[in-house]
Each structure stands twice: as structure tokens, then as C-alpha cells.
């Protein structure tokens, strides 16, 4: 074996990285996706079906350009048709690993962090996955509709519809990751809040991290993914495990996968425990840290490639 090849292989082993993991998320691309999402003619809520349809088409185009096998999952809610958008990467058969983010908003708000940041990360993750020469397992990226009120915690949530469809077809599912609000960071002391005060002693008072949230008894996948995410991240990560009844632990699309027995977890900037613009008109693009959003996205890719 030639010396340069030996050196290259040793470098990869020392770095502990998958050979194809060098691609990195682009903050400029994240910004362009967010600019589109926050500038729709009306807010992306359940009342504006035409807007949601236009966003679904945009997501489908972007996912397709990244090399995903794109499909839609339309369903009925409140007398209207809504749709999830799905893009598959890697093998066409075998167990599926699901990564999802909801693209609707709550009420009359731009929803830059909630959940434009998660959707932008999902689209950038698609671009990075499309550059991988040989994924070992199927990865499905899913953009959900109707996560927000008035459909939250109902069977009309897009993630419930998707999780149920996997269960009904008896699909093999490795696990699920929900990307929910990943763009807001605050380095000031006291900027981070918690549902239970003493948690501040353990996790700190600065809102400068991503948290990987899983429930007690949440399964092997959630445990392994959170560990790989932490190890691969270039920004602080706090791994949290707690009972599902603790406020915030089940406040996103992963909860519907739990209902069908799948191992699932949440990646988040902790939403309203940090970002006081949550569900307000002030949830705008200029308040986000796109550099750290890119790093959070890179860590998702690194964890996926290590599983």
C-alpha cells in the first residue's frame, strides 16, 4: 500500500470520522430557505391551505434537487387536504431511520425559529445526505404539517399520520429524530430557563447549547443517537432524559412515534425555555444564529453516519 494512502487512512481513523462526512452545512443556504419560509404571503398556519401547499411544493423541489426520492402524503383534516412531504435516501429497502420537522406555524407569526429553523436544517441535511456515496441504511426525511394548535396532540398531526402509516404497513423503523427549533442561542447568564428549577444547577444558565431530549425507557436508538450527536457536535450539547410528563419533553412530533412503540428523540434549542419570541410575531429571522444552526445540522449528519 502506498504511503500517502496509509497516511490518509490513519488520519481518518484518528479523527474518528466517516470518510464521506467532510461536507458541512452552509449558513447561506440555511438563510435562503428561512427567507422563503418567513416571507410567504400569509403565515404558514392551518387556515392558509394554499400557502401550506406552496411550501410543500418548495420543500419537494428542494428535496428532489438533493437527490431524494420524493413523495407526498396527503390527508384530510377539518374538511381540507394537508400534506406531509417525504424524501428517501440510501437503500430502497430495509429499516428506515426517520428525521422530521414540521413546517407549519402557530397563528399569525413568521415562525423563523418555530419551526423554520428545523425545516431549513432538514433541507440542508438532505443536500448533505445526497452527497454521501453509499449510505448503509434508508433515511427518510419528513416535513410534517399541522404540528401546531389547534391540531397539536390530535390524530390530525402530520407526524401522527406518518407514524401510523409506518405501523400499519409494518415497516421496520430504526428510530426517529425530531428537529424542533434549532436556531436561537443566547450566551448571557440567566438566559436559559427550565421546567424544574434545580435543573439549572446541572445544565447551566446560559442558552448556548442544543439539547437532545429523550424519555425514560425511550429505547436503544434514542440513547445511541444522542450519544453520537454529542460526540460529533462542534457546539455545546446537553443530553436530557426525563419522564414524558415533564413539560417540554413531548412537545413535538416525536411524541407520535412513541405512541406506536418507536424509539424517538427531540433535538431543540429548548423553545420557550430560552426563546421568548416563541409563538409571537417577533419570532423573526434576524434573531437566529445561523452559524450555530449550521453546526447543529452538521452534528445530525455526523450522528446518522455513525449509527
Image (cartoon, rainbow, N blue to C red):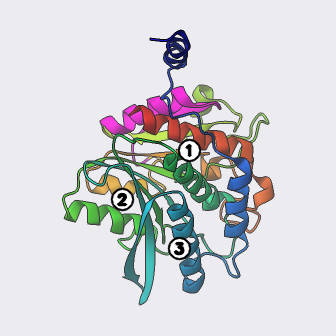
Neighbor class of circle 1 (other Cα within 10 Å; few <14, some 14-19, many 20+) is: few
Query: Residue 166: image x %, image y %?
Result: 27, 61
The numbered mark, 1 or 3, whose residue comes first in the sequence reads 3
Determine which of the numbered discs, if any, sits on residue 41 in the image.
none
* Residue, far bottom: 79
What is the x, y in percent for residue 52? Answer: 56, 78
Residue assigned mark 1 = 195
SS at badge 3:
helix
Residue at position x 69%, y 33% in the image: 205
Stretch of the chain drawn in magenta: 220-245
The answer to which of 244 and 297 lies nearer the viewer is 297
Residue drawn at point x = 27 percent, y = 66 percent: 165
Residue 140 vertical position relative to residue 211 in the rendered view, above or below: below
Counting residues from the N terminus, which is met first, the one under dot 1 or under dot 2?
1
Q: CA distance from mark 1 to mark 3?
A: 34 Å
Q: Which mark is residue 256?
A: 2
Point out the image quarter for the C terminus.
Answer: top left
Where residue 124 sits: x, y (%)? 59, 52
Q: What is the quadrant of the N terminus in the image?
A: top left
Q: Nearer the viewer, residue 131 or 158?
A: 131
Q: Nearer the viewer, residue 296 or 187?
A: 296
Above-or-below relation of 113 to 74 = above
Residue, disc 3 = 56
**Other residues around mark 2 within 10 Å, as few (<14) / some (14–19) / many (≥20):** many
Q: Is residue 123 left or right of residue 43?
A: left
Indicate yes or no whether the magenta region holds residue 251: no
In-image side of 195 versus 292 (left or right): left
Local SS, label 2: helix
Q: Earlier in the sequence, mark 2 or mark 3?
A: 3
Marks counted in the figure total: 3
Q: From the viewer's perspective, tell me whether residue 294 is left or right of residue 245.
A: right
- In the rendered structure, are the residues bearing label 1 and label 3 in contact, judged by CB atoms less than 8 Å apart? no
Amino acid at each position: 500500500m502506498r504511503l500517502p494512502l496509509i497516511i490518509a487512512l490513519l488520519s481518518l481513523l484518528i479523527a474518528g470520522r466517516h470518510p464521506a462526512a467532510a461536507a458541512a452545512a452552509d449558513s447561506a443556504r440555511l438563510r435562503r430557505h428561512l427567507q422563503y419560509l418567513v416571507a410567504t404571503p400569509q403565515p404558514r398556519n392551518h387556515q392558509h391551505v394554499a400557502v401550506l401547499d406552496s411550501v410543500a411544493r418548495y420543500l419537494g423541489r428542494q428535496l428532489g434537487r438533493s437527490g431524494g426520492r420524493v413523495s407526498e402524503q396527503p390527508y384530510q383534516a377539518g374538511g381540507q387536504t394537508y400534506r406531509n412531504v417525504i424524501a428517501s435516501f440510501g437503500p430502497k429497502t430495509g429499516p428506515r431511520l426517520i428525521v422530521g420537522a414540521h413546517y407549519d406555524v402557530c397563528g399569525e407569526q413568521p415562525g423563523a425559529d418555530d419551526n423554520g429553523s428545523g425545516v431549513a436544517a432538514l433541507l440542508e441535511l438532505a443536500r448533505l445526505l445526497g452527497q454521501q456515496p453509499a449510505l448503509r441504511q434508508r433515511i427518510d426525511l419528513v416535513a410534517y404539517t399541522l404540528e401546531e394548535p389547534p391540531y397539536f396532540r390530535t390524530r390530525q398531526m402530520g407526524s401522527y399520520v406518518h407514524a401510523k402509516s409506518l405501523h400499519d404497513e409494518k415497516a421496520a423503523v430504526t428510530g426517529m429524530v425530531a428537529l424542533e427549533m434549532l436556531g436561537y442561542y443566547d450566551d448571557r447568564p440567566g438566559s436559559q430557563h427550565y421546567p424544574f428549577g434545580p435543573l439549572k444547577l446541572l445544565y447551566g444558565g446560559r442558552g448556548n447549547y442544543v439539547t437532545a431530549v429523550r424519555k425514560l425507557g425511550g429505547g436503544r436508538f434514542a440513547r445511541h443517537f444522542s450519544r453520537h450527536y454529542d460526540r460529533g457536535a462542534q457546539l455545546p450539547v446537553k443530553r436530557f432524559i426525563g419522564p414524558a410528563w415533564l413539560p417540554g419533553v413531548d412537545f413535538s412530533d416525536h411524541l407520535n412515534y412513541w405512541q406506536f412503540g418507536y424509539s424517538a428523540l427531540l433535538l431543540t434549542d429548548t423553545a420557550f425555555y430560552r426563546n421568548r419570541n416563541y409563538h409571537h410575531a417577533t419570532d423573526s429571522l434576524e434573531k437566529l444564529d445561523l452559524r450555530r444552526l449550521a453546526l447543529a445540522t452538521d452534528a445530525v449528519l455526523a450522528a446518522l453516519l455513525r449509527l
